[in-house]
Amino acid sequence: MSADQLVYCRVCGQAWQGAKPADPCPANDGGLLVELEAHQRYPHDPLLGRRVKERFVIVGVLGEGGMGAVYKAIQQPVGRPVALKVINSDLDDPNISARFFQEARVVSRLSDPSIVTLYDYGEAEDGSLYMVFEFIQGRLLFDLVRSEGPFTPKRAVDLALQILGGLVEAHAMGLVHRDLKPENIMVTTNNMGDEKAKVLDFGIAKMVGPDDSGVRTREGIVLGTPRYMSPEQAQDLTLDGRSDLYSLGVILYELLTGRAPFVDGAAIEILMAHINRPVPPMDGSLGVPRALSDAVLKALSKQPADRFADAGSMGQALRASLEGAPAPPTLDDTIEGDDLGATLMLNDGTSQRLPPLPTAEPKPPQHTSIVQPVQHSGGGLPTWLIALLAVLVLGAVVGIAAWLLSGPSGGEVDEVDAGTVKIKIGGGD
């Protein structure tokens, strides 16, 4: 019998068959049953078999991180499995509690399908902070790309577009994720066989903008995963949503090539590579469309101003890259200054100044006459006399021209250079 079919009581030390995780121990010793495999892998974890806030029984371990761990728990009395993230209570950050509750309130309002749903949050009995999320069954993108990568361009873009949909909502609320990576993205398959991406962890999310309220990460502490950090995050600079777009650019690069752009060396070397080194070009044999590779490289620009302005703009560019046509730019119809210049508004929200329109040289009058009515003011020549004089003058001009064109044979030929065409005037061959 395999271990995953057994449950374990950490009080009596017995494995039991026929019971479920979170059930009371059949020995009536007060213990709560946990997954046997979880106990075997984490025999000293103090939270396994514990009850949090009287309704969440921790029965398994889903993952660990620098700020805490994520557990599988059973919500009682409904028996619903949930993911319970516990934030370490001993973190050396005096603002951790205020920042946690501020950000949890924002995350709880996120409703995009690509973001895991937050059910509950608060402070546990031992003073640690916790969040309760929906339990997602699927495979981590981290595992998929290592077992199945590189992805086809369509598959990679489809997943990226779903993630961008969640970022549009989060960024609109002033929330920056700060730790986008394949380990924080779960891929599930619906009943129609379509892959769905779920961003799992906003645990080190950061409020920016007017909602920040002055609650910040302690100066000098850089949070995140070096392989996916933006250059500004690696330098502990001010962040906005474009930092998340850089991280997603790293993920896309990895999905398309099977390898992140910077992976070699210690953490500090990887961080310095993000800050200073150019992104290695994608292998042409992978079949990545040029427009798609250009979009990924734009997301990976060192300077935030050179990236896409927001998640929506990046999504438009990714869609266009698979359609084989660039996203159409729009022209700002405002004319600025005396040079009649215009501003080209690009799809990514940036603008580019167009050169002034060239000043046209005045053209000679055409051989078309516009006859305007003569206004009589009571004086001057009568109309019939003016018409007669015009006819006489026109006849004289025609006669002179005919005489010139029929000049003596063999006479001197004049040439007038009219650019690319030579026009001969006079007789001759």
Image (cartoon, rainbow, N blue to C red):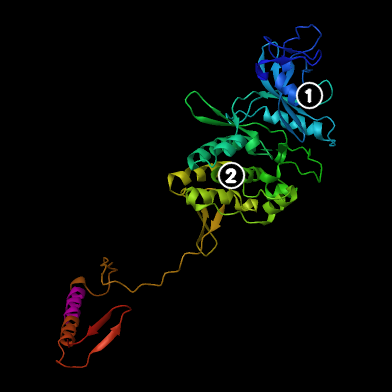
Stretch of the chain drawn in magenta: 385-395
The image shows residue 70 at horizontal and vertical percentages of: 72, 27
383 with respect to 305 (left or right): left
Looking at the image, is mark 1 or mark 2 earlier in the sequence?
A: 1
Amino acid type, residue under disc 1 in the picture: Pro
Instruction: Mark yes or no: residue 125 visible.
Output: yes
The image shows residue 171 at horizontal and vertical percentages of: 64, 38
Amino acid type, residue under disc 2 in the picture: Glu
Q: Quadrant of the C terminus?
A: bottom left
Instruction: Mark yes or no: residue 349 visible.
Output: no
Reading the image, the residue beneath label 2 is: 254
The part of the image, by quadrant, that contains residue 137 is: top right
Q: Please give the name of the residue rendered at 27% of the width and 66% of the height, measured from the top-left corner.
A: 372
Q: Residues within 10 Å of mark 2 (few under 14, many from 20)?
A: many
**Viewer-nearest of discs 1 and 2:** 1
Which residue occupies the foreground of this view, 295 or 82? 82
Q: Please give the name of the residue rendered at 23% of the width and 84% of the height, measured from the top-left corner.
A: 424
Q: Is residue 394 magenta?
A: yes
Reading the image, the residue beneath label 1 is: 43
The image shows residue 252 at horizontal and vertical percentages of: 57, 43
Q: Is residue 329 above or below residue 401?
A: above
The part of the image, by quadrant, that contains residue 379 is: bottom left
